[in-house]
Amino acid sequence: MNKGMLVVLSAPSGCGKDTVYTELCKIRNDIVKSVSATTRTKRDGEVEGVNYYYLSKDEFEYLIKNNGLIEYTSYNNCYYGTPISNVTNAVNEGKICFLIIEVEGAQNIMKLFPDDCVSIFLLPPSFEVLEKRLRGRDSDNEDVIQGRLKIAKDELTYKDKYDYNVINDKLDACVDEINQIISAELSKRNA
Ligand code: 5GP
């Protein structure tokens, strides 16, 4: 059995991490996603257990107290966290498990799994493009957008802590680049 691998994928909100993952699933059948828990409200089109497990604050804090999360953070006044079982199952079963998480959580995963983790930071072509993309989402109000833009500026300062930086300008090219990174890392690990 191949060794399992964690792929930590981070990017400022609006850079298209989820779209990139969806496109990758169309060309690879060996990847799974760690479904996070969150206290934020569900956006239109999102599905419980697919995009997130949507929890109340009390439910989330119960998970924290009972060591159910391998990492968690507070982002834009909501909790987000990775259930422990997602990650341990994937590594033990030899799967490639994507953790699509923000920068602080990503640093924690890199420290916890230095040998089993590949980290990728997705960059927008420019900050102006990122702002335009965020404003294109109908579901978020101005306060949320301003909050996300401020966080995005801070997050961009973390890019050098990742193994790879990939610019998401043209989606196909970006997906292709990440696909090649995964294949190269897999061959390295299973040589
Ligand atoms: P969104 O509300 O746009 O779905 O997510 C907001 C941010 O939280 C994104 O950067 C997303 O990657 C991050 N995020 C989602 N799940 C987790 C998680 O389990 N842990 C951490 N640390 N960040 C997460």
Image (tube, rainbow, N blue to C red):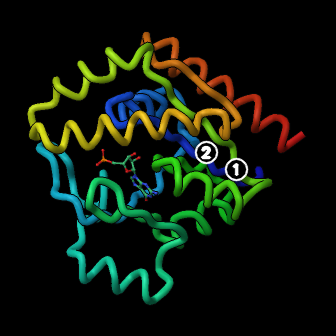
Q: Please state which of residues 179 and 26 is positioned toward the viewer in this rendering.
A: 179
Q: Of helix, strand and loop, which one carries label 1? A: strand
Give whichever of discs 2 and 1 has the lower sequence position: 2
Q: Position of residue 160 (x, y in %)?
A: 66, 33
Q: How far is disc 2 from disc 1 in space, using C-alphas?
A: 6 Å
User: Are the residues at dot 2 and dot 1 in contact (C-beta closer than 8 Å)?
Assistant: yes
Can residue 1 be seen here?
Answer: no
Which residue is tagged 2?
7
Task: Give amino acid for label 1.
Answer: Cys
Query: In this rendering, is residue 4 above or below 125?
Result: below
Which residue is tagged 1?
117
Q: Mark 1 packing: few (<14 Cα in 10 Å), some, or many (20+)?
A: many
166 left or right of 154 in image: right
93 left or right of 19 in image: right
Name the quadrant containing residue 12.
Answer: top left
Name the quadrant containing residue 73.
Answer: bottom left
69 left or right of 49 in image: right
Q: Position of residue 156 (x, y in %)?
A: 50, 33
Residue drawn at x 38%, y 20% is 127
Quadrant including the N terminus: bottom right
Q: Of helix, strand and loop, which one carries label 2? A: strand
Q: Please state which of residues 76 and 112 is positioned toward the viewer in this rendering.
A: 76
Numbered circle sitting on residue 125: none
Task: Give amino acid for label 2.
Answer: Val
Query: In this rendering, is residue 7 above or below 78?
Result: above
Query: In this rendering, is residue 190 above or below 187?
Result: below
Q: Please state which of residues 101 and 132 is positioned toward the viewer in this rendering.
A: 132
Q: Mark 2 packing: few (<14 Cα in 10 Å), some, or many (20+)?
A: many
Query: In this rendering, is residue 142 above or below 170?
Result: below
